[in-house]
């Protein structure tokens, strides 16, 4: 009887890992079996339509040509019936709710309007003449009450869950009416009444009102100017106040007042002829980021269609299809609780087509294709930029990285654009019914036969368990299973021709089917991160063929969109080499297959959101302008797999393909929903709309998901759902998701399920609170934008400040010169982008008081800011002073160039700074501080916040003071260290090893002190802070004594 040998340590670890994996797989399978993609309970009943024939029983008695007339509703109804949309809606019974009127209207005004029911025509005309652009009819009051009742009844049903969304076809319009005044065809402000009713009676906390009528809804704005629970967004014709209603408060500086400051957003168009790209630019760059941060529970739309091409009042050139896309973007908010309420629109055909386009999206149909060019004009970009400037101090989602505004070598003029058509045409998709089956699913269990013979429980084999668990999930007949055929099943050439220079490589992989294990191991070692078994070739061929079948089903109209659950993954594979678990690049092959299928170089967009850069896909299309390749990936300055500089932002393609490769490289871990959505809003969607793809392929790796062991990122399943939804607005919804990486069982399964639900048209899940985007991510996005704006008009936003530049006297170059040091060299955090260092003193709209030039260095410090050289803000000083220069400088060293008669900045209140002496630096103080080498010879000055809401987190300083020479407690670095003012840990900054950033994220401690320049930074406010609470810690004498004592301490 021979004694059994105990297993060694490696074998023990392997067995333990296997047991844990099996247990996780069993738990996951049990959980996934409970998932249900069936119709029941997945969504509300459908789209409600509120309409009443009585709304057509009034018109102008003394002017038959008055634009606001009953024929408007007649034209809409006829077009809805023609397109078969009327019967697809759920009719809503209309009831009047007089109690709701008194919530938003003056009682005296309501009584006055009621009295018009008994007035003669002469009296009605006389009363109408006391208002601007209105008429009165004996039925006007009753119809206005009925119109409000339509919207309120629709609102109640949507909020109760009976309906998913709705459209109110009502007149008279309402968005110009104030609480006690008629204006612009409007008697009662229906949306204002509905918003207040939802807030006060239905328990809604936050409401978003979007007004896309060509006229500014000044009545709605006035109702909620001081209300932070109502976010009002208006995009309208303004022409510097020349267009009705001719109000200064219709301009972008009108941001709200009091507690409502920042919650009123105006995007004013200053020229006519605005097109689809202009409206999309405003939505993508401004509305969506703010709305995701605001997180409304209800979206109300003042749906005027007088901006549609052909309207005599609007004189704009937007297509009806554009409003389908705007509606689609809004349905990502508030769980899809979106209500459209008819406002203006006075060309009957344009009005009816616009309503039909928006309603089809509410009903779940794909967005129609927009006619190119889908690019914003210079005037639109200027308007968007001015609104961004006005609001970026209120919304962290608008803050940008260190762009240079405008970057060099960027074209200043618009590219050649085709003239806008004179009349609108019916989009071909309007009459074409979408495919009966919405989503196709392709998967074959034979793909599980590819495995790692030497580690059955390696990270890639986790996908096996996930695929096995997802496949049997009940889909209630909502997903159509597609036929699976291996690539080349109908002949080798049918897919080999899609990969140039690859025949020899394919034969090499094919030969592995008959190899022995030892030879397979040796063959795998020839590539980067590859394992091979006898079934690998057939599984890889099956994966590519599955994606082909999904693409073909979408292009031939069998399904609207599709999901391909395949393995092995493909996006790392080159045309002639395997790489990173990948053999054949399934998505790249599918793009070429699609072009061969339609017989022309159709435009294909490939979005790769796998956490690893898809090096293989990029290389295959670097010179091809018919394929737009976009990758969101972790880069870490080239150290993250595949560890190639080709993944950096400056790799844009070659030859005719320049600009068609767009890399968004993250230079650190923990990127999550905020960062990915910012990339979508600022870069990916604007470029994608301008590219105008005919097919969207997604390399859908989920290793950036929260909990993935390889990615180290924090993207939620809910965020993947929202990204999928945003993509569905492209290519008439022809989107194919192809599984790539993902190595956490729960994360990949939940994420793929969320994406599939979105493809099926289910309401989007809530994202929850979104933190501010990481500063490193903002820098990456800024760099990508700066690189690509030469190729894409949609990225050419103006400078971030629209203020006039100060004219300063010239100074000696050695004393005062423009800053040129890149932000990453500043050591520590920089001032948050776009927030005024000192609020402008002028409150009138459109004017900003420019501060006088400073007359000494202390005044210069008061007025200076840390801005790019081309910033146009009122405080353009960038100081670079030799450290040998004391502060304040000796008399005459800097004061002589400035006029002596100019007043100094007002002193700070004694209650804030006098006792702390924190601002009274003594001569020679800077010389006594040891600055790190990367700051030698330079000093930057900023104006900090005088207060922030996180000061209560500051704890008393240690009894023995602060040691400014202390090393980082994590890595021992002595460069760019910070101390936490809550726990007094000393850690390195963002440009060393980011240990203080990680500490702040994990601990929630917001305030830190820089040992480089003794400044206090708040991570939450994203700004410097100077306040008595912190000034005793940064007191110069205390720090100097500590510094000197450490200089005198013998080294241990």
Image (cartoon, rainbow, N blue to C red):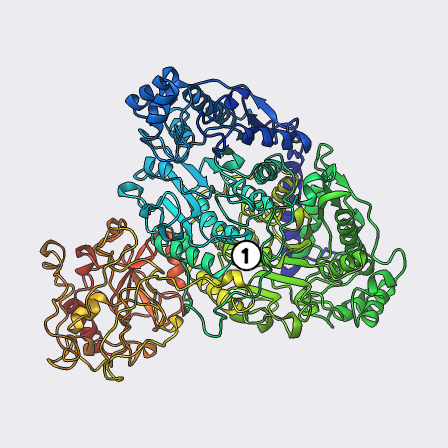
**Percent of width and height locating residue 740:** 67, 55
Q: In the rendered image, which quarter contains the C terminus?
A: bottom left
Q: Report the residue at 60% width, 66% height from top.
A: 641
- 204 with respect to 415 (left or right): left
**Percent of width and height locating residue 533:** 79, 61
Note whether 306 is above or below 999 in the view shown: above
Q: Report the residue at 72% width, 68% height from top.
A: 574
Mark 1: secondary structure: helix
Q: As rendered, which of 527 and 648 lies closer to the eye?
A: 648
Q: Which quadrant of the view contains residue 417?
A: bottom right
Q: In the rendered image, which residue does mark 1 sit on?
A: 686
- 14 with respect to 1008 (left or right): right
Is residue 1048 in sight in this rendering? no
**Percent of width and height locating residue 614:** 64, 63
- 724 with respect to 180 (left or right): right
- Mark 1 crowd level (few <14, some 14–19, many ≥20, 10 Å Cα): many
Q: Which quadrant of the view contains residue 774?
A: bottom left
Q: In the rendered image, which quarter contains the N terminus?
A: bottom right
**Percent of width and height locating residue 763:** 57, 36
Is residue 151 in sight in this rendering? yes
Q: Residue furthest top?
A: 118
Q: Which quadrant of the view contains residue 328?
A: top right
Q: Residue furthest right?
A: 491
- 991 with respect to 311 (left or right): left
């Amino acid at each position: 009887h021979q004694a059994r040998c105990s297993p060694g340590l490696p074998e023990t670890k392997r067995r333990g890992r296997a047991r844990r994996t099996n247990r996780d797989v069993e738990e996951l399978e049990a959980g996934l079996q409970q998932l249900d993609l069936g119709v029941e309970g997945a969504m509300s009943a459908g789209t409600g339509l509120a309409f009443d024939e009585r709304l057509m029983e009034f018109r102008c008695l003394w002017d038959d040509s008055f634009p606001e007339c009953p024929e408007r509703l007649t034209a809409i109804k006829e077009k809805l019936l023609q397109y078969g949309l009327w019967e697809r809606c759920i009719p809503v019974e209309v009831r009047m709710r007089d109690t709701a009127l008194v919530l938003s209207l003056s009682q005296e005004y309501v009584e006055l309007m009621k009295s018009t029911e008994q007035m003669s025509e002469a009296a009605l005309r006389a009363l109408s003449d006391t208002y601007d652009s209105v008429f009165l009819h004996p039925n006007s009051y009753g119809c206005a009450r009925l119109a409000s009742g339509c919207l309120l009844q629709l609102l109640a049903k949507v909020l109760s869950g009976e309906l998913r969304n709705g459209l109110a076809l009502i007149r008279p319009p309402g968005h110009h009416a104030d609480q006690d005044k008629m204006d612009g065809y409007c008697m009662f402000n229906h949306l204002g009444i509905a918003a207040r009713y939802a807030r006060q009676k239905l328990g809604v906390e936050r409401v978003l009102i979007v007004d896309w009528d060509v006229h500014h809804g000044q009545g709605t704005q006035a109702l909620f100017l001081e209300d932070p629970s109502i976010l009002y967004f208006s995009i309208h014709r303004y022409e510097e106040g020349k267009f009705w209603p001719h109000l200064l408060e219709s301009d972008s500086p009108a941001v709200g007042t009091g507690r409502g400051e920042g919650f009123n957003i105006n995007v004013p168009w200053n020229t006519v002829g605005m097109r689809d790209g202009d409206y999309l630019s405003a939505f993508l760059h401004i509305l969506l980021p703010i709305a995701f941060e605001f997180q409304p529970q209800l979206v109300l739309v003042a749906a005027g269609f007088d901006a549609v091409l052909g309207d005599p009042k609007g004189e704009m050139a937007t297509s009806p299809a554009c409003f389908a896309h705007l509606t689609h973007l809004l349905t990502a908010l508030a769980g899809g609780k979106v209500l459209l309420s008819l406002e203006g629109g006075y060309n009957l055909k344009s009005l009816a087509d616009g309503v039909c386009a928006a309603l089809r999206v509410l009903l779940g149909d794909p967005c129609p294709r927009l006619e190119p060019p889908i690019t914003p004009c210079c005037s639109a970009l200027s308007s968007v930029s001015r609104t961004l400037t006005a609001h970026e101090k209120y919304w962290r989602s608008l803050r940008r990285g260190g762009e240079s505004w405008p970057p060099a070598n960027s074209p200043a003029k618009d590219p050649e654009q085709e003239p806008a058509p004179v009349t609108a045409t019916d989009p071909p998709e309007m009459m074409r019914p979408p495919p009966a089956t919405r989503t196709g699913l392709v998967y074959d269990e034979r793909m599980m036969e590819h495995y790692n013979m030497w580690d059955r429980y390696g990270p890639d084999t986790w996908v096996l368990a996930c695929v096995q668990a997802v496949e049997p999930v009940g889909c209630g007949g909502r997903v159509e299973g597609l036929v699976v055929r291996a690539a080349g099943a109908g002949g080798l050439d049918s897919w080999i021709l899609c990969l140039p220079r690859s025949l020899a490589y394919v034969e090499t992989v094919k030969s592995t089917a008959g190899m022995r294990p030892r030879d397979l191991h040796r063959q795998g070692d020839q590539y980067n991160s590859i394992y091979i078994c006898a079934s690998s070739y057939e599984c890889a061929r099956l994966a590519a063929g599955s994606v082909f079948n999904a693409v073909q089903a979408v292009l031939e109209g069998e399904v609207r969109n599709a999901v391909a659950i395949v393995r092995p993954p493909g996006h790392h594979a080159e045309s002639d080499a395997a790489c990173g678990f990948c053999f054949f690049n399934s998505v790249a092959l599918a793009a070429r297959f699609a072009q061969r299928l339609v017989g022309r170089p159709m435009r294909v967009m490939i979005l790769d959101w796998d956490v690893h850069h898809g090096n293989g896909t990029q290389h295959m299309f670097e010179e091809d302008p018919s394929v737009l390749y976009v990758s969101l990936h972790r880069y870490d300055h080239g150290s993250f797999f595949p560890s190639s500089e080709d993944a950096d932002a400056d790799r844009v393609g070659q030859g005719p393909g320049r600009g068609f490769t767009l890399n968004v490289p993250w230079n650190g871990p923990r990127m999550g929903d905020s960062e990915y959505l910012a990339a979508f809003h600022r870069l990916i969607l604007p470029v994608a709309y301008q590219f105008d793809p005919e097919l969207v392929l997604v390399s859908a790796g989920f290793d950036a998901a929260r909990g993935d062991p390889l990615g180290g990122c924090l993207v939620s399943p809910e965020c993947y759902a929202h990204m999928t939804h945003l993509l569905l607005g492209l290519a008439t919804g022809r989107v194919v998701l192809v599984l790539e990486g993902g190595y956490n069982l729960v994360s990949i399964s939940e994420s793929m399920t969320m994406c599939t639900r979105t493809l099926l048209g289910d309401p989007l899940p809530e994202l929850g609170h979104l933190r501010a985007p990481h500063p490193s991510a903002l820098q990456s996005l800024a760099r990508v934008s700066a690189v690509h704006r030469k190729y894409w008009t949609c990225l050419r936003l103006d400078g971030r400040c629209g203020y006039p530049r100060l004219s300063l006297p010239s100074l000696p170059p050695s004393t005062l010169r423009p800053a040129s040091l890149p932000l990453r060299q500043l050591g520590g955090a920089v001032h948050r982008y776009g927030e005024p260092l000192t609020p402008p003193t002028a409150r009138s709209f459109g004017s900003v008081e420019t501060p006088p030039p400073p007359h000494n260095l202390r005044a210069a410090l008061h007025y200076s800011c840390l801005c790019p050289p081309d910033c146009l803000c009122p405080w353009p000083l960038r100081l670079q002073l030799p450290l040998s220069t004391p502060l304040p400088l000796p008399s005459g060293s800097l004061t002589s160039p400035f006029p002596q008669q100019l007043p100094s900045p007002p002193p700070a209140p004694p209650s804030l700074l006098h006792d702390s002496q924190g601002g009274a630096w003594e001569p020679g103080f800077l010389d006594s501080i040891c600055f790190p080498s990367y700051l030698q010879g330079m000093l930057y000055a900023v104006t900090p916040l005088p207060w922030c809401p996180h000061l209560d987190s500051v704890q008393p300083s240690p009894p023995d003071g602060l040691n400014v020479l202390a090393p980082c407690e994590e890595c021992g670095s002595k460069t760019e260290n910070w101390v936490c003012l809550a726990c007094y840990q000393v850690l390195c900054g963002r440009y060393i090893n980011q240990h203080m950033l990680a500490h702040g994220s994990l601990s929630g401690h917001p305030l830190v002190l820089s040992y480089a320049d003794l400044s206090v930074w708040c991570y939450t406010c994203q700004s410097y802070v100077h306040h008595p609470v912190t000034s005793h810690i940064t007191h110069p004498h205390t720090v100097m004594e500590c510094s000197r004592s450490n200089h005198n301490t013998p080294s241990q």
